[in-house]
Image: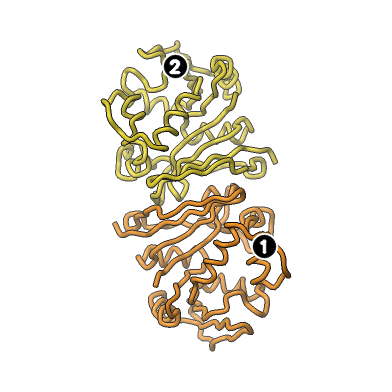
Chain colours: A yellow, B orange
Amino acid sequence: MVVFFSVSMSLDGFIAPGSLGELMGRQWMELQAWVFPQQFFRENLKLGGGGEVGRDNDILRETYERTGTSIMGKRMFDAGEQMWPEDAPFHTPVYVVTHETRDPWERPGETTFHFVKDGIESALEQARAAAGDRDVRIAGGGAMILEYLNAGLVDEFSIALSPVLFGSGVRLFDGVDESRVALEQVRTESSPRVTHLTYAVRKR
Amino acid sequence: MVVFFSVSMSLDGFIAPGSLGELMGRQWMELQAWVFPQQFFRENLKLGGGGEVGRDNDILRETYERTGTSIMGKRMFDAGEQMWPEDAPFHTPVYVVTHETRDPWERPGETTFHFVKDGIESALEQARAAAGDRDVRIAGGGAMILEYLNAGLVDEFSIALSPVLFGSGVRLFDGVDESRVALEQVRTESSPRVTHLTYAVRKR
């Protein structure tokens, strides 16, 4: 059982534009350009058949298949609630760290959102218990990922490093506690569109 | 004739600590950890024989051998003037962009520093003229590299992405004009210590 995250990042360290209004803008599309043509992406979002089937596609599928449960922050959930199709693309329990009380929200296709009010460690405990022999993914957003990373609760992570510069936006590692987090390179793979970097997290 | 830069960068985008006093500190040593054991590094700084001879070493040597002339900013020169050995590790003409008037400074071992007062384009013109059939390297620091990048004067660059997080310091791409600079992945290679990323710069 591994706790991991997996995100696309610009070469200058950004994982999202500065405002939700820019989602689907040029920068975001370039950041995610490696994802859209993949067969797995099309299949998972029910966009129809076809699509690429190389290593990028395998990595998307492997990331999905290893994920037993996901954890996300309230801001990511709020944005996703408006953007995901009814059949949300998780197909597992999802734990949303929030300050609001809300009953579990079941979606068609086996995604159930559980709202956790008592903090990130409780959310992780619940996510671990429900993940079976698969892994727990910290889905996002950036602030949630950093909370888990700084708390020493992330075992490894993967970054799809896209050949784009943002200049501004949401930085993945903004506020990282560098005095606690050491990294070890696990694997690097590149395709024409993106470089996949995997690191193990070690305590200093 | 290619105009390029080549730097080591932390996974969160930093190429140097925030102050000169931290040079040679833990973060800097981790950032450059892939360089120190290499045979070429030892040989070029006359630290004695031995050292590693794998792909990392080849990349250091290739970068050195392709460089006909270098350009650097005044702050990098000021720091280097105190740190380089008398036999400075360039062994080519070096053009220092500055506001001060100063006669060329010849060092043993074929390094001559020329001080250029009339701007980055003039420095590049002089560097090109002196580079012969080799390339022009924008050596640093970060601000100088960004000036050339934003001016559309860089053809390609290489980043040795080190498995370390800085949290603060000098960001390579701070202030990049993302509306003008597009990137294309050229090559990715990794060793156990570092991932070498090469990009071509395209105008948008």
- Residue B123, quarter of the rendered image: bottom left
Check the residue under mark 2 and report the chain it is in: A
Asked whether the viewer can see residue B4, the reply is yes
- Residue B109, quarter of the rendered image: bottom right
* x then y, percent, for residue A92: 45, 17
Check the residue under mark 1 and report the chain it is in: B
Q: Is residue B46 above or below residue B100?
A: above
Residue in the foreground of this view, choosing between B198 and A85? B198
Neighbourhood count class around disc 2 (C-alpha, 10 Å): few under 14, some 14–19, many 20 upward: many
Q: For this view, does B62 lie left or right of residue B3?
A: right
Quadrant where the image shows the C terminus of chain B: bottom left
For label 2, the residue is A113
Asked whether the viewer can see residue A98, the reply is no
Q: Is residue B139 above or below residue A198?
A: below
Amino acid type for the residue under numbered disc 1: Gly
Q: For this view, does A40 lie left or right of residue A9?
A: left
For label 1, the residue is B21
Mark 2 vs mark 1, foreground winner is 2
Q: Is residue B69 above or below residue B177?
A: below
Amino acid type for the residue under numbered disc 2: Phe
Q: For this view, does A204 lie left or right of residue A61?
A: right
Toward the right, the furthest residue is: B48
Task: Name the residue located 63 percent from the left edge and 66 percent from the top edge.
Answer: B40
* x then y, percent, for residue B121: 38, 76
Task: Name the residue located 66 percent from the left edge and 59 percent from the top edge.
Answer: B52
Separation of marks 2 and 1 at Cα, in angstroms: 49 Å
Task: Name the residue located 37 percent from the left edge and 57 percent from the top edge.
Answer: B177
* x then y, percent, for residue B106: 59, 86
Q: Secondary structure at mark 1?
A: helix
